Structure formats: structure tokens, C-alpha cells
Amino acid sequence: MSGHLLIDGYNVINSWKEFESLRKENLEHAREILVQKVAEYSAFKGFKTQVVFDAMNVSGDACAEKISGIEVIYTGEDETADSWIERRAHELGREKAKFFVVTSDYAEQLNVLGSGGHRISAREFHEDYLKAKKDISERLTLPKKLLNRNELGGRVSSDVLAVLEQMRRDKN
């Protein structure tokens, strides 16, 4: 899979159960954990990803930073993540780019669909994230046979191996 992935950060944090207590205790830490999870997911799936957090009630300008290969955006004063994502979705739609938006906000989903994008609810994203984590884990767990470097024993059947072993013993 490839393309652009836009994520409404607080929408996901407020939807995933694993963030329930953390978001009440330390919202900054919840953001950091989400960004790391999204970075891992995006690298595995091949997305160019932007996670957007709104600063609706905070004064100041918008800012963005690259963290672990993804762009994290904090919107400016009086701008919601929804409006930033909708504007970006419209730009990507005009470019005919393939893009996905993660949000459970129904109005935002309609705007995304109208711009030619694909919507993913926070729940669906959570399920796909867990599946990707499982796939990553399976790829990292190599079968014992593959760990035998480039030895012949790792590439032939046990029957052939037994015949070769017998030949070796008979020769000595």
C-alpha cells in the first residue's frame, strides 16, 4: 500500500482504549506514543503520513516537525485539525493523489469522500494497526531453517540430508 495518510491525532487518542487513562494523566505522552505507533505502521505500509493535532485553544502559529519519518502538525490558533485535514484532502484530491484519512468524525469523513479520498474510522485504524503489528512480528521471527546462514542443510529436505550424511560416514 502507498499514498498519503492523514490522521486526526486527538480523534484517535480519544477513541483507542489504550489511551484512556494516559490521556487524562499526560496528554503529551499520549501524543508521543501515538506518533511512534503511527511511524511504525506507516513505515511498514509505505505511507507518507501526517498526524495533525489541533491547537484550537492555544495561542500561536502552526508548526510542524518530522518525527521518525512522519510529519507531526500542530495547527495554529483558531484552527481545528478537521479544517487542516479537509484543506489538505482537497489539495491531494486536486493532485489526484491516493490518500486516506483517519477520523471518526462523520462530517469530516464526508468531506474526505467528496475530495476523492478514503476514510478510515479510528476503530478500523486500530484493527489495521494491530494486524500490521502482528505481520511485522511474523516477518521478524524467521524460521529456524533460515537462520542456518547459507548452509546446505538449511536448503535440502531431511531425506536428502540423511542420504548425504550416510555417504559421509561410509567414506570415512
Image (cartoon, rainbow, N blue to C red):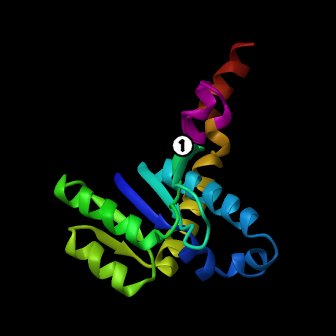
Residues rendered magenta in the picture = 147-160
| Direction from residue 59 to residue 95 in the image, left or right | left
Image quadrant containing the N terminus:
bottom left
Of 30 and 130, the residue lying toward us: 30
Question: Residue 15's x, y, as percent?
Answer: 59, 82
Tell me: residue 150, above or below residue 147. Answer: above
Give me the residue at 63% from left, 45% from top: 142
Of 155 and 17, the residue lying toward us: 17
Query: Residue 17 magenta-drawn?
Result: no
Tell me: residue 49, above or below residue 86. Answer: above
Residue at the far front in the pictured view: 59
Task: Give amino acid for label 1.
Answer: Gly
Quarter-of-image position of residue 102: bottom left
Tell me: residue 106, above or below residue 170. Answer: below
Q: What is the secondary structure assignment of the residue under circle 1? A: loop
Q: Is residue 1 visible?
A: no
Query: Residue 151 magenta-drawn?
Result: yes
Residue under numbered circle 1: 69
Question: Residue 38's x, y, as percent?
Answer: 56, 58
